[in-house]
Image (tube, grey):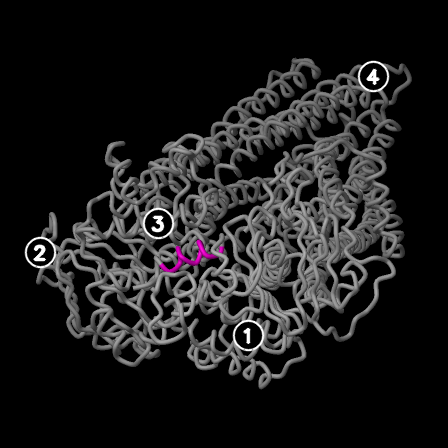
C-alpha cells in the first residue's frame, strides 16, 4: 500500500507543505490576537504589566498611538485569515484530487483482475463479498490515504507546532497542562478496540433483521399460504430486539466515553487557571501572548489528540480492507493461455472426452469420473441425468471454465489447454440454464461477444434464434434497453436472446445447458424451435429432457453421480430397461389417448 | 401466469425532505409515551445541560478576566475550585443526556420497526403486487434511521444548542451590549452561508451516491454475469466501461471537495474575521473609554476577554442548528412515509363473524366466482365447479387464461370480486383464514426458500415436526436420497432465497414442505416444471398415492400428468370453455384435444 502511495509522491509532498503552512498560519493568527490583547492591557494597566512582547524584534516605533497598533494587528489577523482561506481551499481540492486518482487507479485494476479470475474463485466467494471487496474495501484504501496518511501528517504537524509554541511560552506550564494527554490517548484507543467489534456485530444483527423482512416480502405467498404470519412476526421481533440490545450496549459505553474524553481537557484548563495564573502573578508569562494564547493552543491540541482515536481506528479498518483488496490483486490466474498457445481461428468441431475426472475440491466426492465420448463435427450429443448428476459441470469443462484433474478434453484432436484461451472461447457458443442479460440494449446484448457486429449480423442471429419477431414488437426494437438482468422480458424471450448471443459469432461448437429449465412450460415451445435452428450445422452438446430433442440427438448420454450409466442412440436406449426408458415413458402419450384423438389405429385393445 | 400490470403507485417519486408538520411531530412524539419516564428525564437533563455548558465557559473566562487579570491568587484558587465542580456536574449530566437520548431514539425506532413488520404481515396480496421490495425495505432502514435522528439528534441537540446560544447571548449582553450588537449583526450572514452551502453540498453528495450506486450496480452485474463475460471474452470492453463509471463517480467526489473546500474555510475565515473586528472595536472602546462616558477601561477590558471566550458559544450553534433543521426535514419525509404505510388499511379477508373450521372434509365449490386485479380488467368470469373431497381437478389453458388466479383464490390470497367460493358449504369469506390455511398445501412454480437449513424450510409446513417426520415426508415423496445427497443432507444451508440449490432441488423441498403439512387440500401449480425428468418420474409415482385421499388442484403443462384427474377444466380468457374427464374431452375434439395434439407432436416419436 505504501508502494502505491509512493507512485503519487510529488503530489503528496506538495500536500504536506500546504498543510504545514496552514497550521503555521492558524497559530500565528492566534498569537497575534494575544498580542493585541497585551497591547490593550498594557495601555489600560501600564504600571502592573510588562510591555507587550513583539515577536521577531518587529516592535513598532514607540511613538505610535496604541489604537493604530491594534488596528494594524487586527488588519494582519484579517489578512492572514484571508490567505489561509485561499490556501485551505486549494489544499482541500488538491487532497481530493490525489485521493481520487489513487482510488480510480486501484478500482479499475481490481475490476480488471476480478474479471479474469476463474469460475472456481466465484464459486468459492459469494457474489456479495466480491462486490464488497471492490467497493467497500477499495473505499477503505481510500480511508487509509485520506484518514491515515493525510490526517496523520496533519495531526503530527499541528501537534509539533502547538507543542513548540507552548514550550516557547513556558515549558513547565506545558508539562503540567499536558499531564492528562497520555491518559486521553490510551482511553481513546482502548475504547475504539472495545466498540469497533460491537458496531460490526450490531451491523450484522441489523442485516439479519432486514433479511427477515425482505424474505417475508419475497416469499409472501409462502408465509400466507402456510399461515406463518405469527411465527414470522416473532422471528422479526427477536431479530429487532437483539439489534436493539446490542445498540443499547454500545450506547452505554459511548455515553461513558464521550463525556470523559471531553472532561480531560477541562482538567488541563483548570491547571492552566491555577498554575498559569500563579505564573502570571510572578510575571513569568504575559497575559495575552501567554495565558490567552496558551488557552487557545491547548484547545487546538486536545482537538488533535481527540482525533488520534479516529486515526487508529482508520488504521485498523483500512488495513483489513486493503489486505482483502490485495488478496484479489495477488490471486493467481488459475486458467490462462499457455506460453506457446496454439491459435484456433475456426475449429472443425470434433469434441472428445478422454477419461475425464473432475472434482470441485478434494474433500468432496468427484463430480465427474472417467468420462469418455466423442462428438463428430456437426453432430448433437444430448445429456440426461438427475439433478446434480454433473451435466452442467461436464459442459463447463469444454470452454475451460474449469480444468479437469484427470484426463483431457480434445477439440480437433488438440488438448483444449494448449489453445489460446480467447480463441477457444470464441469458438464455443454457450447458453446457460438461467441466462444472464446485461442492462444494455437488445442489440448490445446480442452483440455481447462481438461489440463491433453489424446490425445485419445481429438481426440474422436473432432470426435464427426466433427472436426477431418479438424484438421488432418491443417499443424501440433492437434499441430497447433491458432492465436489470432482463426483467422486462419473459423467460422465453430472455433465452432466445441468449441463443442469438451465442450464435452471433458463428461458433462451430454450441453448448446448451438445459435452456428450458427455468422457463414457464407453456413458453417452452418458443425456445425449442430456436434451439433446433441454432444447432443446425454445429457440434452441439445439450442438456435436455424433452423427448423431441433427445430423439434428434446422434448420441444420448445418461449421467448418474458423475458417471456415464447409459450411452447410445435414442432408439437403443428406449429398448433397454433403465433410467431412460422410465423418463421417456412419462412423456409419451398413452395409446388410449391417441386412439381417442384418432391419431393411432387401435392395435391391441378396443374397437374403433 | 396472470399478473396485474404494475401501477404507478409504487413508482412515484419519493421526497427526500418535507416541511415540518405538527401532526406528524405529534404522532412521532406519541411513540415516546411508552417510554415516558425516560423521555421526561431526558428533557429535564437536556434543559439543565444546556445551561451548564455556557456557564462553564463563562466561569473560565471570568476567572481569567477577573482574578488572574487582577493577580489575586486566593481568588484564582477559589474560582478554579468552582470551575472544577461545575465541570464535573456538566460532564455527568452530559453522560445521562447522551445515554437517554440514544436509548430513547432506539426505543422509538425499535417499536416502529416492530409495528411496520406486523402491519406488513396483515397486508393483502394486492399490496405486494403493487409495492416494490426496495421501497418496503427502505421503510425500516433509511426512513426509520431518519426518524431516529429526528428523536435523538434534532430534539436533544437543538435544545442544547439553542440554550447555549441564548445563555451566551445573555452573558455577552450583560457585559457589553454594544459589542454584542456587532456580534448579532453577523449571525444572519453566517446562517445564510451555512444554509446555502449545505443545500449545494447535499445535492452534490446525492450525485456522489447516485454515481456510486451506478458503480455498484455495474459491478454487481459483472459479478453475476461473470460466466457470460468470460464465455464471450468481453473482459477488456467491460473494464473500459467500468473505468468510465468510476471516473464519473470520482468527478462528483471532486465537485463535493470543491464545495467543502470553500465552505469550511469560509466558516473559519468568518470566525477569524470576527476576531479581528472584536480586537479593533474592543480595543477602540477600551482605549477611547467606550461609548458610555463613565465606562471603566478595566471593566471594558474584562468584557473583551469574556467575549473572546463566549463568542464561539454563540456562533457555533448557528451552523449546528442549520444542520439539525435539515435533519428534521429529512425526518419529516421519513415519518410521512412510515405513517402512510402504517395507515394503509389491510384488506379484510375474514368477515368479523368468521368461524373456525378445525378439520375440513375438502369440498371446494366455485359459485359464479369472478375476479379482477384491477377494476377494469376482468380476469375470471363466472367460474362454477365443485371438487368433491378426495377428487383431483386439473386445469389446462393457454398463458393468461386464469389458471393461476383460480389457484390464488383457493389459497385465499384474494377474495372473489363477485360470486362465492364455498369450502364444505361455507363461504370462504366467513372462515377464519388461519384455521383454513393450515389445511392447505401449496407447491408453486416460483418457489421461495428462506435462509436456513433444508430442515428449517421443510418445517415451514409444520413448525412442530420432528426430524423424523421431516424425513418421512421426503421418503413418502421418494426423494429422501436426493436430499441426503446434498453437501450436508438435511442440514444444508440453502442460502439466501435458496441460492445454494438448483431450481429442481428447491422445488423438491417445497414439495416436502407441502407434504409435511398433511393438508386436506393440495395445490400444485406447475409444481414439477423445474424438476428434471428423471426425478419427476419418481415424484409422479409417489404423488399418485399421496393425492388419493386429498382434494387436489393441479395445473400442469405436461399433459401426461393430468390424465388421471377426476375432472379437467379447460380455461380460456378467464372462462371455463370445456370440462370433463381426459377421455371425454379428447372425444369432444375441442380446445383440449387441440392442445393435446400439439403436445403429442412435440414429444412423441
List x then y, in percent, for residue B483.
46, 77
Side (left or right) of A63 relative to A369 = right
Circle on res. B512: 1
Task: Look at the image and tell me in which quarter the C terminus of chain A lies.
Answer: bottom left
List x then y, in percent, for residue B405.
62, 53
Pointers 4 and 3 within a single chain: no
Pointers 2 and 4 within a single chain: no
Front position among marks 1 and 3: 1
* Image quadrant assignment for residue A225: bottom right
Front position among marks 2 and 4: 2
Part of the protein shown in magenta: B592-600
- Is A15 drawn above or below residue B4 in the view shown? above
Measure the C-alpha gap from mark 2 to mark 3: 27 Å
The residue marked by circle 4 belongs to what chain?
B
Q: Which residue is mark 2?
A: A340
Circle on res. B289: 4
* Residue located 65% across and 33% down the image: A289
Circle on res. A110: 3
Measure the C-alpha gap from mark 2 to mark 4: 95 Å
- Is B270 drawn above or below residue A598 in the view shown? above
Amino acid at each position: 500500500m505504501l508502494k502505491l502511495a509512493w507512485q503519487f509522491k510529488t503530489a503528496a509532498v506538495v500536500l504536506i507543505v500546504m498543510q504545514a503552512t496552514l497550521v503555521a498560519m492558524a497559530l500565528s493568527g492566534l498569537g497575534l490576537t494575544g498580542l493585541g490583547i497585551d497591547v490593550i492591557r498594557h495601555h489600560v494597566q501600564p504600571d502592573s504589566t510588562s510591555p507587550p512582547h513583539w515577536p521577531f524584534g518587529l516592535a513598532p516605533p514607540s511613538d505610535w498611538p496604541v489604537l493604530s497598533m491594534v488596528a494594524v494587528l487586527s488588519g494582519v489577523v484579517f489578512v492572514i485569515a484571508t490567505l489561509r482561506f485561499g490556501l485551505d481551499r486549494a489544499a482541500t481540492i488538491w487532497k481530493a484530487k490525489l485521493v481520487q486518482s489513487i482510488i480510480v487507479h486501484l478500482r479499475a485494476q481490481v475490476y480488471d483482475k476480478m474479471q479474469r479470475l476463474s469460475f472456481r474463485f466465484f464459486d468459492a466467494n459469494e457474489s456479495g463479498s466480491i462486490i464488497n471487496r471492490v467497493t467497500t474495501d477499495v473505499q477503505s484504501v481510500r480511508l487509509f490515504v485520506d484518514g491515515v496518511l493525510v490526517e496523520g501528517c496533519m495531526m503530527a504537524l499541528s501537534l509539533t507546532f502547538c507543542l513548540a509554541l507552548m514550550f516557547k511560552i513556558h515549558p513547565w506550564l506545558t508539562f503540567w497542562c499536558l499531564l492528562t494527554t497520555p491518559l486521553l490517548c490510551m482511553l481513546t484507543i482502548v475504547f475504539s478496540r472495545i466498540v469497533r467489534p460491537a458496531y460490526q456485530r450490531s451491523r450484522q444483527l441489523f442485516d439479519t433483521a432486514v433479511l427477515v423482512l425482505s424474505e417475508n416480502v419475497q416469499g409472501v405467498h409462502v408465509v400466507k399460504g402456510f399461515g406463518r404470519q405469527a411465527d414470522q412476526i416473532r422471528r422479526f421481533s427477536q431479530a429487532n430486539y437483539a439489534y436493539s440490545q446490542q445498540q443499547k450496549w454500545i450506547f452505554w459505553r459511548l455515553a461513558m466515553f464521550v463525556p470523559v474524553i471531553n472532561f480531560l481537557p477541562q482538567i488541563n484548563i483548570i491547571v492552566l487557571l491555577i498554575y498559569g495564573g500563579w505564573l502570571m502573578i510572578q510575571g513569568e508569562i504575559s497575559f495575552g501572548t501567554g495565558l490567552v494564547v496558551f488557552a487557545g493552543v491547548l484547545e487546538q491540541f486536545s482537538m488533535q489528540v481527540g482525533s488520534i482515536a479516529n486515526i487508529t481506528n482508520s488504521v485498523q479498518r483500512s488495513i483489513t480492507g486493503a489486505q482483502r483488496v490485495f488478496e484479489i490483486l495477488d490471486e493467481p490466474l488459475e486458467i490462462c493461455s499457455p506460453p506457446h498457445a496454439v491459435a484456433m481461428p475456426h475449429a472443425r468441431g470434433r469434441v472428445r472426452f478422454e477419461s475425464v475426472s473432475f472434482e470441485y475440491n478434494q474433500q468432496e466426492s468427484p463430480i465427474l469420473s472417467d468420462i469418455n465420448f466423442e462428438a463428430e463435427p456437426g453432430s448433437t450429443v444430448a445429456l440426461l441425468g438427475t439433478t446434480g448428476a454433473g451435466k452442467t459441470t461436464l459442459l463447463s469443462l469444454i470452454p475451460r471454465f474449469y480444468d479437469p484433474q484427470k484426463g483431457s478434453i480434445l477439440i480437433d484432436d488438440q488438448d483444449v489447454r494448449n489453445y489460446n484461451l480467447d480463441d477457444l472461447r470464441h469458438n464455443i457458443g454457450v447458453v446457460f440454464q438461467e441466462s444472464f442479460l446485461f442492462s444494455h440494449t437488445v442489440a448490445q446484448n446480442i452483440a455481447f461477444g462481438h461489440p463491433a457486429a453489424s446490425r445485419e449480423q445481429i438481426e440474422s442471429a436473432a432470426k435464427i434464434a426466433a427472436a426477431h419477431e418479438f424484438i421488432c414488437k418491443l417499443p424501440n426494437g433492437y434499441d430497447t434497453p433491458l432492465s436489470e438482468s432482463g426483467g422486462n422480458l419473459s423467460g422465453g424471450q430472455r433465452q432466445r436472446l441468449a441463443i442469438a448471443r451465442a450464435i452471433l459469432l458463428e461458433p462451430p461448437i454450441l453448448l446448451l445447458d438445459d435452456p428450458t429449465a427455468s422457463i414457464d412450460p407453456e413458453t417452452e415451445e418458443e425456445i425449442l424451435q430456436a434451439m433446433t435452428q441454432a444447432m443446425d450445422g454445429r457440434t452441439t452438446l445439450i442438456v435436455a429432457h424433452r423427448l423431441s430433442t433427445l430423439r434428434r440427438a446422434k448420441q444420448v448420454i445418461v449421467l448418474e453421480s458423475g458417471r456415464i450409466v447409459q450411452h447410445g442412440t435414442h432408439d437403443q436406449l428406449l429398448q433397454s430397461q433403465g433410467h431412460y426408458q422410465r423418463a421417456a415413458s412419462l412423456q409419451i402419450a398413452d395409446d388410449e389417448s391417441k386412439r381417442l384423438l384418432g391419431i393411432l389405429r387401435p392395435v391391441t385393445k378396443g374397437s374403433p | 401466469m396472470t399478473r396485474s400490470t404494475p401501477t404507478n403507485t409504487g413508482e412515484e417519486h419519493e421526497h427526500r425532505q418535507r416541511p415540518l408538520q405538527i401532526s406528524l411531530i405529534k404522532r412521532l412524539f406519541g411513540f415516546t409515551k411508552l417510554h415516558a419516564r425516560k423521555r421526561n428525564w431526558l428533557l429535564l437533563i437536556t434543559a439543565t445541560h444546556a445551561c451548564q455548558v455556557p456557564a462553564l465557559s463563562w466561569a473560565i473566562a471570568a476567572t481569567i478576566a477577573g482574578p488572574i487579570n487582577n493577580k489575586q491568587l486566593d481568588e484564582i484558587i477559589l474560582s478554579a475550585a468552582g470551575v472544577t465542580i461545575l465541570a464535573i456536574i456538566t460532564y455527568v449530566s452530559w453522560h445521562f443526556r447522551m445515554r437517554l437520548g440514544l436509548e430513547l431514539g432506539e426505543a422509538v425506532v425499535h417499536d416502529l420497526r416492530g409495528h411496520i413488520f406486523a402491519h406488513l404481515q396483515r397486508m393483502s396480496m394486492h399490496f405486494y403486487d403493487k409495492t416494490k421490495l426496495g421501497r418496503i425495505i427502505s421503510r425500516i432502514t433509511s426512513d426509520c434511521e431518519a426518524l431516529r435522528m429526528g428523536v435523538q439528534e434534532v430534539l436533544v441537540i437543538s435544545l442544547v444548542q439553542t440554550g447555549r446560544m441564548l445563555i451566551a447571548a445573555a452573558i455577552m449582553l450583560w457585559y457589553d451590549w454594544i459589542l454584542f450588537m456587532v456580534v448579532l449583526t453577523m449571525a444572519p450572514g453566517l446562517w445564510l452561508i451555512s444554509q446555502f452551502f449545505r443545500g449545494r453540498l447535499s445535492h452534490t453528495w446525492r450525485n456522489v451516491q447516485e454515481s456510486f450506486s451506478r458503480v455498484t450496480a455495474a459491478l454487481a452485474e459483472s459479478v453475476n454475469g461473470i460466466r457470460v463475460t468470460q464465455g464471450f471474452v468481453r473482459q477488456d470492453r467491460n473494464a473500459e466501461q467500468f473505468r468510465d463509471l468510476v471516473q464519473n463517480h470520482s468527478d462528483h467526489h471532486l465537485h463535493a471537495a470543491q464545495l467543502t473546500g470553500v465552505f469550511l474555510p469560509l466558516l473559519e475565515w468568518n470566525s477569524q474575521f470576527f476576531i479581528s473586528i472584536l480586537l479593533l472595536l474592543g480595543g477602540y472602546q477600551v482605549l477611547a473609554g467606550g461609548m458610555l462616558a463613565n465606562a471603566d477601561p478595566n471593566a471594558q477590558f474584562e468584557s473583551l476577554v469574556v467575549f473572546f471566550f463566549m463568542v464561539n458559544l454563540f456562533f457555533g450553534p448557528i451552523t449546528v442548528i442549520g444542520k439539525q433543521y435539515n435533519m428534521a426535514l429529512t425526518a419529516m419525509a421519513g415519518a410521512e412515509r412510515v405513517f402512510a404505510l402504517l395507515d394503509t388499511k389491510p384488506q379484510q379477508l375474514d368477515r368479523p363473524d368468521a368461524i373456525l373450521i378445525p378439520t375440513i372434509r375438502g369440498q371446494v365449490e366455485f359459485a359464479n366466482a369472478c375476479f379482477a386485479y384491477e377494476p377494469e380488467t376482468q380476469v375470471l368470469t363466472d367460474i362454477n365447479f365443485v371438487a368433491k373431497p378426495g377428487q383431483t381437478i386439473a386445469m389446462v389453458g393457454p398463458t393468461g387464461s386464469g389458471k393461476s388466479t383460480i389457484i390464488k383464490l383457493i389459497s385465499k390470497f384474494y377474495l372473489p370480486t363477485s360470486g362465492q367460493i364455498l369450502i364444505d358449504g361455507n363461504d370462504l369469506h366467513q372462515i377464519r383464514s388461519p384455521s383454513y390455511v393450515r389445511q392447505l398445501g401449496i407447491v408453486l412454480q416460483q418457489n421461495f426458500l428462506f435462509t436456513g437449513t433444508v430442515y428449517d424450510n421443510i418445517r415451514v409446513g409444520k413448525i412442530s415436526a420432528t426430524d423424523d417426520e421431516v424425513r418421512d415426508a421426503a421418503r413418502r415423496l421418494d426423494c429422501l436420497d436426493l436430499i441426503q445427497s446434498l453437501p450436508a443432507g438435511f442440514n444444508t444451508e440453502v442460502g439466501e432465497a435458496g441460492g445454494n440449490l438448483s431450481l429442481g432441488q428447491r422445488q423438491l423441498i417445497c414439495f416436502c414442505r407441502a407434504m409435511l403439512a398433511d393438508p386436506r387440500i393440495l395445490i400444485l401449480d406447475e409444481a414439477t416444471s423445474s424438476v428434471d425428468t428423471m426425478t419427476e418420474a419418481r415424484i409422479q409415482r409417489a404423488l399418485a398415492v399421496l393425492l388419493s385421499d386429498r382434494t387436489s388442484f393441479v395445473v400442469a403443462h405436461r399433459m401426461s400428468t393430468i390424465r388421471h384427474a377426476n375432472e379437467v377444466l379447460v380455461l380460456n380468457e378467464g372462462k371455463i370453455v370445456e370440462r370433463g374427464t381426459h377421455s371425454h374431452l379428447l372425444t369432444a375434439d375441442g380446445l383440449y384435444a387441440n392442445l393435446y395434439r400439439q403436445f403429442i407432436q412435440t414429444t412423441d416419436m
